[in-house]
Amino acid sequence: MSCTYKYPTGYKIKKAFWTKNPAKGKEPPDLQRLQYLGDKQQNCTIRLNHVTQKDSHMYYFRFITNKSDGKWVGHPGVSLNVTGDFHE
């Protein structure tokens, strides 16, 4: 999935990752299974291999900067709907 993002001048990205089902007041988990192909500048592209119906979720890009007020989650997110299991 291709993705780009922007953030205010003067901030530096410390961590960038994708998550799902973020709960208010809780730190969203980093989804290790997603292969993050982006960088820490403006690219947040990911790849998810061997997709199954269990991967059907809303996914959100999340990044944390060097400033205490610099944490963002991309809303509304990206919906992935898998209608069948695929095998190689």
Image: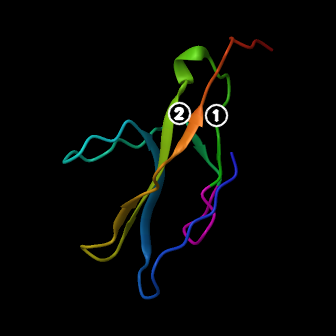
Q: Which residues are magenta?
A: 38-44
Relative horizontal placement of residue 51, taking residue 26 as reference (left or right): right
Q: Residue furthest front?
A: 76
Q: Which structural element holds mark 1?
A: loop
Task: Name which quarter of the figure residue 28 lies in.
Answer: top left
Instruction: Label 2: state its secondary structure.
Output: loop
**Of the pair 45 and 24, the residue shown nearer to us:** 24
Q: Does the stretch in magenta take in 69? A: no
As drawn, the residue found furthest toward the left would be 25
Q: Quadrant of residue 39?
A: bottom right
Colouring chosen for the image of the structure? rainbow
Task: Identify which residue is drawn at 46% across, 55% down.
Answer: 74
Check residue 33 in the rendering and tell me which mark sits there, or answer none. 2
Rendered location of residue 42, percent (x, y): 60, 69
Q: Position of residue 80 (x, y in %)?
A: 60, 31
**Which residue is denoted by mark 1 in the rendering?**
48
* Kind of residue sitting beneath label 2: Arg
Q: Write the residue at 45% across / 52% down.
A: 75
Tag 1: amino acid: Leu
Say if mark 1 contacts mark 2, CB within 8 Å.
yes
Residue 27 percent location from the top left of the image = 26, 47
Query: For the point 57% across and 72% down, which residue is it?
Result: 41
Q: Residue furthest bottom?
A: 10
Q: Position of residue 71 (x, y in %)?
A: 33, 65
Residue drawn at x 65%, y 53% as measured from the top left: 45
- Whether residue 22 is situated above or below residue 73 in the rendered picture: above
